[in-house]
Image (cartoon, rainbow, N blue to C red):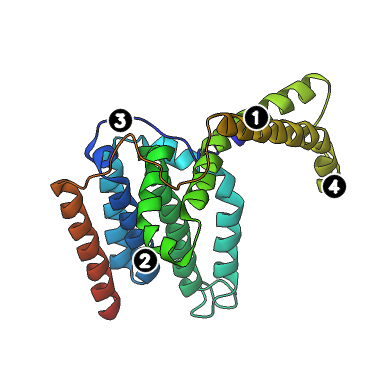
C-alpha cells in the first residue's frame, strides 16, 4: 500500500506538458479544479474526462502510474459511493428498496469527481519538478510580500515536504520489512491490535525524520541560507507562446463548463 502513494514523485520527460511554465500549470490546475466542481450534468463530466485523458496522453504519463495513486483512496471512494447510494431520495430501483436511480447517478458522479480531482493534481507533480513548482508558486504569490507574508519560506517548506514524501515512504517500507522479518504482524487481528503493531514502526520513523530535518537545517546554515531576501534563481521562468495558448484554452474550458451548467447539461 505504501508503494502506491505516488504524491511528490516526478517523472522527467520532454513533452509539451513538461515544457510548460510551472506558473501556467498551477493556474491550469486551479481552473481545472473549479471546472470540475462546476460540472453537474453528464455532458459536463464527459468534457472534463475527455480533457483529463487528453492531458494524460500529451504528458506521456502511463495510466497505471496515475491510477496506482488511487489505491490508498479506495476506502474513501467506496464510502462516498455507498453514502450517496443509500442516502439520496428519488425513484427506487426496485419498489420498496432504499436504493434509488438518483442515488446511483449521484454516486457515479462523486466517484468521477474524486478520481478526476486526484489524477488532475497528480499530473501536476508528475510533470513538474519540486524546484520548478516552488519557483512558480513563489512568483504567483509574490504580490503577498507587500503585506509581509513569508511567501519564500512557505514555498520552501512545501518544496521540502514534496521532496521528502517519497523518501519517508521508502523508509517506512524498509522499517516495516525489517519488523516483519522479526515476526511483526501488521495485517491480522483487530483494529486496535494492528494500530498497536505500528508503534515499533512510528518510533524509528519519527527519530529518522527529526534526524533528517536537523541535518537539512545544518546544511542550509552552512551554505549561509537566510531566506528569500536578495536571492536569485539559476533558471529564470519565462512564459512562451505555448503557455499563453494553454492559458487561453484553460479559460475557454472553464467557460464551456459554466455554460453547460447553465444549460443543465
- Placement of 218 over or under 120, stated as above or below: above
Residue 169 visible in the displayed image: no
The residue lying toward the viewer, choosing from 43 and 145, is 145
Numbered tag placed on residue 13 in the rendering: 3
The Cα–Cα distance between marks 4 and 2, rounded to whole angstroms, is 40 Å
Instruction: Kindly indicate whether the residue at mark 4 contacts the one at mark 1 (C-beta within 8 angstroms).
Output: no
Name the residue tied to disc 1.
Answer: 215
Label 1 or label 3, whichever comes before in sequence order? 3
**Residue 63: image location, x then y, percent:** 38, 38
Instruction: Kindly indicate whether the residue at mark 2 contacts the one at mark 4 (C-beta within 8 angstroms).
Output: no
The Cα–Cα distance between marks 3 and 2, rounded to whole angstroms, is 27 Å
Label 3 packing within 10 angstroms: few (<14), some (14-19), many (20+): some
Label 3 or label 4, whichever comes before in sequence order? 3
Label 3 or label 2, whichever comes before in sequence order? 3
Name the residue tied to disc 2.
Answer: 34
Q: Which of the 4 quarters of the picture holds residue 263?
A: bottom left
Camera-near label (1 vs 4) is 1
Q: Secondary structure at mark 3?
A: loop
| 144 on left or right of 198 | left
Instruction: Kindly indicate whether the residue at mark 2 contacts the one at mark 3 (C-beta within 8 angstroms).
Output: no
Name the residue tied to disc 4.
Answer: 192
Determine the residue positioned at 47% across, 35% down: 9
The residue lying toward the viewer, choosing from 57 and 145, is 145
The Cα–Cα distance between marks 3 and 4, rounded to whole angstroms, is 44 Å
| 164 on left or right of 151 | right
Amino acid at each position: 500500500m505504501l508503494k502506491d502513494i505516488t504524491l511528490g514523485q516526478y517523472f522527467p520527460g520532454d513533452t509539451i506538458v513538461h515544457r510548460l511554465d510551472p506558473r501556467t500549470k498551477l493556474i491550469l490546475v486551479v481552473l481545472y479544479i473549479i471546472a470540475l466542481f462546476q460540472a453537474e450534468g453528464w455532458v459536463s463530466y464527459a468534457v472534463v474526462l475527455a480533457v483529463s485523458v487528453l492531458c494524460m496522453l500529451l504528458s506521456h504519463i502511463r495510466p497505471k502510474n496515475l491510477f496506482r495513486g488511487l489505491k490508498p483512496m479506495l476506502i474513501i471512494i467506496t464510502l462516498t459511493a455507498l453514502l450517496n447510494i443509500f442516502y439520496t431520495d428519488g425513484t427506487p430501483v426496485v419498489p420498496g428498496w432504499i436504493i434509488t436511480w438518483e442515488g446511483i447517478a449521484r454516486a457515479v458522479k462523486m466517484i468521477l469527481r474524486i478520481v478526476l480531482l486526484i489524477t488532475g493534481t497528480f499530473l501536476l507533480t508528475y510533470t513538474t519538478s519540486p524546484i520548478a513548482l516552488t519557483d512558480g508558486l513563489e512568483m504567483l504569490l509574490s504580490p503577498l510580500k507587500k503585506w509581509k507574508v513569508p511567501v519564500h519560506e512557505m514555498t520552501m517548506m512545501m518544496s521540502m515536504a514534496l521532496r521528502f514524501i517519497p523518501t519517508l515512504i521508502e523508509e517506512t517500507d524498509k522499517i516495516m520489512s525489517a519488523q516483519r522479518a522479526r515476526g511483526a504482524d501488521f495485517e491480522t487481528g483487530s483494529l486496535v491490535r494492528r494500530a498497536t503493531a505500528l508503534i515499533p514502526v512510528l518510533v524509528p520513523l519519527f527519530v529518522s525524520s527529526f534526524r533528517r530535518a536537523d541535518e537539512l537545517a545544518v546544511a542550509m546554515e552552512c551554505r549561509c541560507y537566510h531566506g528569500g531576501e536578495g536571492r536569485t534563481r539559476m533558471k529564470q521562468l519565462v512564459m512562451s507562446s505555448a503557455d499563453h495558448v494553454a492559458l487561453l484554452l484553460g479559460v475557454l474550458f472553464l467557460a464551456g463548463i459554466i455554460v453547460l451548467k447553465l444549460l443543465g447539461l
